[in-house]
Amino acid sequence: MGDKTLTDINRRLVQYYRAAAADIERDILRLFDKLTEESVDGIIRPNDLYKYGRYYDLQREIYKRLQELGEQEIAMQTAKYKELYDWINENMPSAIPDNAARPVWTAYNPVQAEQIINSVWCSDGLYWSDRVWNNKTALQQRIEKGLVDCVVRGAKKSELVKQLQKDFGVGYNAAERIARTELTHVQNEAAAEIYTRAGTTHYQFVNTLDGRTCPACRGLNGKTFAFADKKPGVNFPPVHPNCRGRIVAVITMKNGGEIVPVVRGPRKKKT
């Protein structure tokens, strides 16, 4: 479910960013063409960009469009994270063996989903929505700098378009990284909640070991921690942006209290 959710999010992000880039490109080229027509020799000079306040009008339009983009991202991702949380809550309990000791099983609290999705888990104290808005601010700065630089260099319209596409590519990559990291956070926190409601006290950190595995995650792989001691970013995933870490429950069995890790996923319900 997590992979499908990320695929859905990325597909929507591509749509949103392409539409925003097309709108902003249209506005920039409209001004670029206007200034070219007004120039004596067809060359736009830096001072021309600021005549009649049209550049500042463009800045406001870019800001407005990027605000719309940010609102789309946050609304869509919030809904997708809620869907993922609900799916985990419905299906994850079936991953717990029937012969596991279950000292407690507390009721599902729908408020918990919103609290998890909107929680601050990084040491910098930022919400994930703050990162979305910071990305929009950085994107606008890159767009404006790229436009001014192209005018100063006397670049052609094609170069301006290429620069704009590059700037939006950077913005999209940042948006995808934010989404992927937050999804890892929601997925693992939701699993942790399910397991602790079932009375499980420990979890094991699991990560794919390959060339992309960072030293921190490689060192944590296979280690067991108490839920009471979990610290996102330290011993609980995500440990860093784009983290692929996940947790599996360590179950207390009824047959003598043996501790074993549960590494299988949710079982399909019988029909």
Image (tube, rainbow, N blue to C red):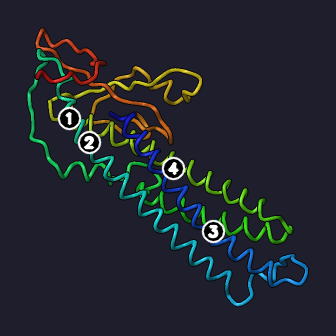
Which of discs 4 and 3 lies nearer the camera? The answer is 3
Which of discs 3 and 1 lies nearer the camera? The answer is 3
First in residue order: circle 1 vs circle 2: 2
Check residue 14 in the rendering and tell me which mark sits there, or answer none: 4
Residue depicted at 27% across the width and 48% down the height: 82
Check residue 26 in the rendering and tell me which mark sits there, or answer none: 3
Tell me the distance, in whole angstroms, between the alpha carbons under discs 2 and 3.
39 Å
First in residue order: circle 3 vs circle 1: 3
Residue 50 placement, left or right of 230:
right
Residue depicted at 68% across the width and 80% down the height: 55
User: Mark 4 packing: few (<14 Cα in 10 Å), some, or many (20+)?
Assistant: some
Tell me the distance, in whole angstroms, between the alpha carbons under discs 2 and 4.
23 Å
Residue 113 placement, left or right of 165:
left
Give the labeled residue for mark 2: 85
Which image quadrant for residue 194? top left
Which image quadrant for residue 75? bottom left
Q: Position of residue 164 (x, y in %)?
A: 68, 60
User: Mark 2 packing: few (<14 Cα in 10 Å), some, or many (20+)?
Assistant: many
Q: Position of residue 157 (x, y in %)?
A: 77, 65
